[in-house]
Image (tube, rainbow, N blue to C red):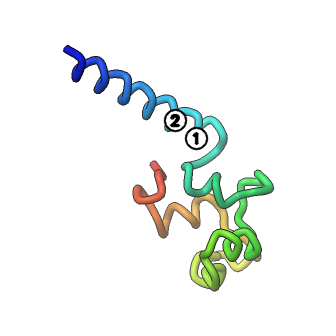
């Protein structure tokens, strides 16, 4: 009985976390890196998060930032992208 209750509560918490991330405009990994909350990752944000030199690899349209779409095309489900 206790195990079922704990499992149910855990599943509910995970659901709420995922729902909040989607409501804020992206997966948790993207949102953690996007410190200015503009839905784009700058080279500075990527470097600060430890992803140095990834701008050239992720910025497919070469506009100087990484969009959520570009980010998810590389990380996919591993980053919480749906």
- Residue neighbourhood size for the residue with mark 2, other residues' Cα within 10 Å, grouped as few (<14), some (14–19), many (≥20): some
State the image coordinates of residue 45 (x, y, percent, origin top left).
Answer: 73, 68
The quarter of the displayed image where residue 41 is located: bottom right
State the image coordinates of residue 24 (x, y, percent, origin top left).
Answer: 66, 40
Q: Mark 2 touching mark 1, by CB under 8 A?
A: yes
Residue at 41%, 59% in the rendered image: 78
**Would residue 8 appear left or right of 77 to someone viewing this image?**
left
The quarter of the displayed image where residue 55 is located: bottom right
State the image coordinates of residue 1 (x, y, percent, origin top left).
Answer: 19, 14
- Residue neighbourhood size for the residue with mark 1, other residues' Cα within 10 Å, grouped as few (<14), some (14–19), many (≥20): some
**Would residue 77 appear left or right of 58 to someone viewing this image?**
left
Instruction: Check disc 1 and report the residue beneath it.
Output: 21
Instruction: Check disc 2 and report the residue beneath it.
Output: 17
Above/below status of 68 relative to 12: below
Above/below status of 81 relative to 62: above
Q: Mark on residue 50?
A: none
Above/below status of 7 relative to 33: above
Above/below status of 38 relative to 70: above
Work out how far the residue at label 2 is from the one at label 1, CA to CA, in angstroms. 6 Å
């Amino acid at each position: 009985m206790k195990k079922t209750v704990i499992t149910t509560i855990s599943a509910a918490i995970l659901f709420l976390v995922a729902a909040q991330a989607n409501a804020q405009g992206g997966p948790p990994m993207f949102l953690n890196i996007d410190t200015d909350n503009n839905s784009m990752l700058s080279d500075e944000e990527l470097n600060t998060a430890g992803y140095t030199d990834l701008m050239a690899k992720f910025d497919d349209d070469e506009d100087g930032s990484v969009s959520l779409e570009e980010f998810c095309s590389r990380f996919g489900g591993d980053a919480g992208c749906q």
